[in-house]
Image: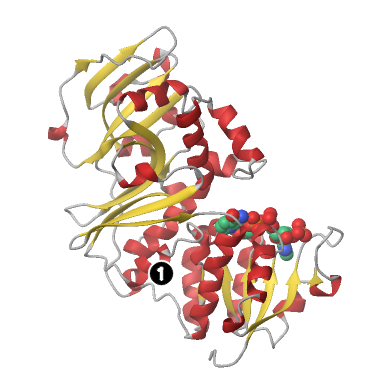
Amino acid sequence: MSYDKKLVVGIFGYGVVGQALFQVLGHTPSLQSTIKKICIKHPKKPRDLDPSWFTTDRNDILNDDEINVVIEVTDDADASFEIAKTCLSKRKAVITANKKMVAARLEELVQLQQEFNTPLLYESACCASIPIIRNLEEYYDNDLLRGFEGIINGSTNFILSKMHQGGLTFEAALKIAQEKGFAESNPALDIHGHDAASKLCILLAHAYGVLLQPNELVFTGIENITPFDISYAKSRNCQIKLVAQALKLENGKVVSFLIPRFVREGQLLYQVKDEFNGLAITSALADQQFFYGKGAGGFPTASAILSDLSALRYDYRYEYRKLLQQEPSVLDQNVHLNVYISYDHWEQLPIQVFEKEEEYFSSFNRHYRKGTISLKTLAISDWWKKPGVSLIVCEDSIAESLNTIHHFSESHFELAA
Ligand SMILES: NC(=O)c1ccc[n+]([C@@H]2O[C@H](COP(=O)([O-])OP(=O)(O)OC[C@H]3O[C@@H](n4cnc5c(N)ncnc54)[C@H](OP(=O)(O)O)[C@@H]3O)[C@@H](O)[C@H]2O)c1
């Protein structure tokens, strides 16, 4: 498909992102694009545009031969996939922000793009305004990319920041996040880590050619983090962040997980506060590089969609080189993690899971243990996600051998007043 001609756009979804996109597209004449129709779900919802813009019949867009680009910004992953699949089969380029859909259906989406020689772009699906997918895809060769670590969900980062700054409980911080519009009224996808896990799957595909479903990842959210954990972090000059990590091991395999982590003052991710996102990439030659920006919101997300739209003008498409042209990397769970686990009751922690113990603390209300645990243990169990148990990985979280672990010692941790 040649994009010398005008981009005639059909949009699915007119919510937070769709409305921002409509505004900015109208003010970006350089893109030479025209919106022809917007498909929404609820016809009676009040809108700020003339009703002639809207339809509830998806075929008004799918069967319109003049529309050559479809921007899909619904919140319905199943509909989103059906729309993307139909568009690609009709050789309409697709741009989507739907990370849940992309992560769950990436293998089929790659095949469809190849079969119909038509691009699907989704920069906005990962960290909204931060151009991370195209960078991983184009700039970092698999062999040179040592790893990345990122804060890739703004809601959870906002909540943890408020807990740290204001000494709030998780529930009180979540309420503020909801009042300010940084968390959904149903925040489950964010706080349990599902949203960030979907993004991590997309990042792994473009970074290392690893294709996996979110439920194959070891991940958790932040709902069990307590003020006790925050006090512990402060006493060590750390903040707790929900960090997506990937690291290429000496054996060429990749270890990856999404678990809360202590981030020490001075580390790059420490400065990523409130609703912001940040990603630090480590490459073999260039050392660390840092991406920082707004990871959600109508306009930041629309900015990434505009960038995709602009890329279509020069026929850009993801080549999935690390997946299709190189030997894709394989995930490895045979590593040891240095972790801190706090808990209400002794019986919540199967103590035999520790391969080595480094530190313990016990008080009337809460206890913690620090030590080494294998990632595989976490992959096959869920006691560490249960209410009352809070598992946080330490700064130097991944150990390929147990030798790096310190000896068991009693802690002198004192709770901050
Ligand atoms: N909001 C963000 O900051 C952000 C950031 C990055 C990515 N995203 C992703 O972008 C997408 C949209 O997010 P949003 O915040 O804009 O969602 P939203 O405000 O809830 O809006 C969703 C829109 O999708 C429409 N819709 C739902 N099902 C549909 C269907 N079957 N056919 C046609 N339209 C349908 C809804 O129609 P009605 O208006 O009729 O209800 C609504 O206009 C999601 O996939 C989200 O994960 C969002």
Q: Nearer the viewer, residue 232 or 273?
A: 273
Residue occupied by mark 1: 134
Quadrant, the N terminus: bottom right
Q: Nearer the viewer, residue 238 or 142?
A: 238
Q: What is the x, y in percent for residue 105?
A: 52, 62
Q: Residue at x 31, y 39 (%)?
A: 376
Q: What is the x, y in percent for residue 19?
A: 69, 64
* The quarter of the picture showing ligand 1: bottom right
Instruction: Classify mark 1: helix, strand or loop.
Output: helix
Q: Nearer the viewer, residue 219 or 396?
A: 396
In the picture, measured across the screen, residue 291 lies left or right of residue 93, that is left
Q: Nearer the viewer, residue 358 or 180?
A: 180
Q: Residue at x 53, y 58 (%)?
A: 99
In the picture, measured across the screen, residue 190 lies left or right of residue 382, that is right
Quadrant, the C terminus: top left
Up-down relation of residue 383 to residue 107 (above or below): above
Q: What is the x, y in percent for residue 305?
A: 55, 69
Other-residue count near label 1 (Cα within 10 Å), few / some / many at <14 / 14–19 / ≥20:
some
Going by the numbered disc 1, the residue's amino acid type is Arg
Q: Residue at x 59, y 28 (%)?
A: 172
Q: What is the x, y in percent for residue 213?
A: 46, 54
Up-down relation of residue 311 to residue 192 (above or below): below
Up-down relation of residue 50 to residue 296 (above or below): below
Count of numbered tags: 1
